[in-house]
Image: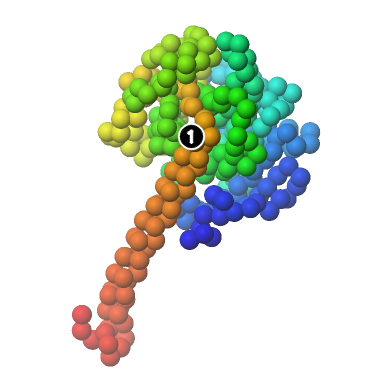
């Protein structure tokens, strides 16, 4: 069982000073996973990561035309975001990209970077995260793998923080919002309505143009693979229904800012929940395979009957 979950806690074999590589197998498909420490990347690697992130984002998100703007404007917005996210002079505390490749083609990226800001006279650590996966690979759960891997790396270095710590996300899809809700104890805005007033005030400070219930326009729309869209449409999960009520136009280019509390206990809870969900999924998968093998042991002897096998002359 441990070998199947090496991506979760196993050490990575470095291929370069700033890159750790391994393979991940999801639903029978084997992909390469590169975990890149952007802070240690040389200029050549930095440019390559930038180009790959832009390639994935451009393919993942619909063009700006879906939100009433021209395509060039949407491309410029994506480029501006990537430039800011990879700016190590501003985000020099933690900056990691988890890239997934099908052969040499980049098909998914999870990115996490940290900034320290002063809010209302106090220093606050803000962890920014984003995830982009090509539509045809969305069913493989790469966002779960990438976020969990990035979180483990962060926890190894910064499990304890001397100041308040939060994760600020711009959720462009209910899938990411659902993923966050399954692992976080305190999220705002949320149907749970358990965020303290201090956290709500911080949200208003960080997102002054986005009061509770109002999404922001990013001018790019999230493309969803058909089965994912069907699941979202029919799901009764309260987190998904909440997101759709507050941001029904996400495919037109609107995102919902979300703040997640990250005290040490929250971090431990999120990591434990991710590991538990991964183990549950693995056991379920092995159980299905066992049932298939048991069925095959009954069916296969009947195939030998045509060859006159003594044990296969009767069903």
Q: Is residue 19 left or right of residue 189?
A: right
Q: Is residue 281 above or below residue 185?
A: below
Q: Residues within 10 Å of mark 1 (few under 14, many from 20)?
A: some
Query: Is the C terminus in the top left, top right, bottom left or bottom right quadrant?
Result: bottom left
Q: Residue at x 58, y 13 (%)?
A: 119
Name, please, the residue furthest toward the bottom: 310
Pinpoint residue 77: horizontal percent, then vertical percent: 59, 18
Please provide percent x and percent y for residue 165.
56, 26
Total marks drawn? Answer: 1
In percent of the image, x 63 and y 36: which residue is there? 158
Q: Residue at x 23, y 86 (%)?
A: 313
Residue 217, image x and y in percent? 48, 15
**Which residue is found at the position 53% from the left and 39% from the top?**
147
Q: Which residue in the rendered view is the most extreme toward the right?
A: 43
Q: Position of residue 188 (x, y in %)?
A: 42, 22
Question: Disc 1 designates what residue?
Answer: 266
Q: Nearer the viewer, residue 266 or 154?
A: 266
4 w.r.t. 43: above or below: below
Which of the 4 image quarters holds residue 215? top left
Q: Is residue 112 visible?
A: yes
Is residue 210 left or right of 42 when viewed as pictured? left
Whether residue 143 appears in this view of the structure is: no
Above or below, comparing residue 245 to residue 40 in the picture: above
């Amino acid at each position: 069982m441990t070998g199947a979950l090496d991506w979760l806690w196993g050490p990575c074999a470095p291929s370069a000073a700033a890159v750790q590589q391994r393979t991940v197998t999801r639903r029978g498909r084997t992909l390469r996973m590169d975990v890149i420490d952007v802070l240690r990347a040389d200029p050549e690697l930095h440019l390559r990561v930038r180009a790959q992130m832009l390639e994935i984002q451009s393919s993942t998100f619909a063009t700006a035309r879906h939100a009433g703007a021209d395509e060039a404007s949407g491309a410029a917005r994506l480029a501006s975001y990537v430039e800011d996210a990879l700016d190590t002079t501003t985000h020099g505390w933690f900056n990691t990209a988890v890239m997934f490749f099908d052969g040499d083609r980049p098909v998914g990226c999870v990115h996490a970077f940290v900034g320290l800001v002063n809010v209302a006279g106090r220093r606050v650590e803000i962890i920014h995260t984003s995830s982009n996966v090509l539509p045809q690979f969305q069913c493989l759960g790469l966002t779960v793998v990438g976020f969990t891997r990035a979180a483990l790396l962060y926890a190894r270095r910064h499990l304890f923080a001397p100041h308040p710590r939060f994760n600020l996300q711009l959720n462009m899809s209910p899938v990411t919002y659902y993923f966050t809700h399954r692992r976080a104890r305190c999220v705002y805005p949320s149907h749970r309505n358990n965020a303290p007033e201090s956290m709500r005030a911080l949200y208003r400070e960080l997102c002054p143009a986005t009061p509770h219930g109002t999404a922001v326009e990013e001018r790019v729309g999230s493309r969803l693979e058909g089965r994912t869209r069907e699941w979202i449409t029919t799901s009764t999960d309260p987190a998904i229904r909440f997101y759709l009520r507050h941001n029904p136009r996400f495919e037109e280019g609107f995102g919902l800012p979300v703040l997640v509390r990250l005290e040490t206990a929250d971090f431990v809870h999120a990591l434990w929940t991710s590991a538990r969900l991964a183990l549950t999924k693995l056991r379920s998968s092995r159980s299905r395979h066992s049932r298939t093998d048991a069925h095959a042991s009954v069916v296969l002897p009947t195939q030998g009957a045509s060859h006159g096998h003594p044990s296969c002359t009767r069903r």
